[in-house]
Amino acid sequence: MMKTNIRAHVVISGRVQGVFFRAETQHTAQRLGVTGWVRNRPEGTVEAVFEGLSQTVQQAVDWCWQGSQNAKVSDVRIEWQEPTGEFENFSITY
């Protein structure tokens, strides 16, 4: 069975800033072995790019619906993209 890399660009809405969402996203991505980044956006959403094996990227996207302990996620918009292999790890960007 071929291992396929995929890339997901997600924007998470709801109460997702000031609730350790970025740190928990980074922890989850690192645990899954997914690369990419996560950041807060000015209008109050969180944006992330996950890249890696299709199964682990899907797990990272699924996790976004739950989020960190005090988060209240109302929506996760997903745009599937071609993987670029540009990331060495998963980071919090600003």
Image (cartoon, helix red, strand yellow):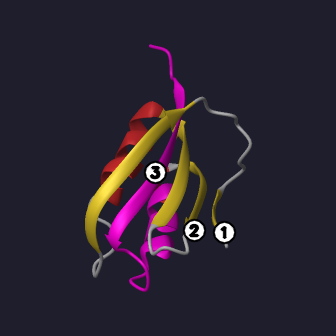
User: Most extreme residue toward the front, as rendered?
Assistant: 43
Q: Is residue 34 visible?
A: no
Number of residue marks: 3
Numbered tag placed on residue 59 in the rendering: none
For image coordinates 34% across by 54% down, the residue present is: 76
For image coordinates 49% across by 72% down, the residue present is: 22
For disc 3, the neighbor class at 10 Å (few under 14, some 14 to 19, many from 20) is: many
Residue at numbered disc 3: 10
For disc 2, the neighbor class at 10 Å (few under 14, some 14 to 19, many from 20) is: many
Mark found first going from the N terminus, 1 or 2: 2
Residues under numbered marks 1 and 2 in contact, where contact means CB atoms less than 8 Å apart: yes
Residue at numbered disc 1: 93
Mark found first going from the N terminus, 3 or 2: 3
Q: Is residue 10 above or below residue 26?
A: above
Residues under numbered marks 1 and 3 in contact, where contact means CB atoms less than 8 Å apart: no
Numbered tag placed on residue 39 in the rendering: 2
Give, as a three-letter code, the residue at label 3. Val
The magenta segment is: 1-29
Q: Label 1, label 3: how many angstroms apart (C-alpha)?
A: 15 Å
Q: Label 1, label 2: how many angstroms apart (C-alpha)?
A: 5 Å
Q: Is residue 18 above or below residue 11?
A: below
| SS for dot 1 | loop
For image coordinates 35% across by 58% down, the residue present is: 64
Give, as a three-letter code, the residue at label 1. Thr
Q: Is residue 48 left or right of residue 62?
A: right
For image coordinates 32% across by 67% down, the residue present is: 67
Which picture quadrant has residue 15? bottom left
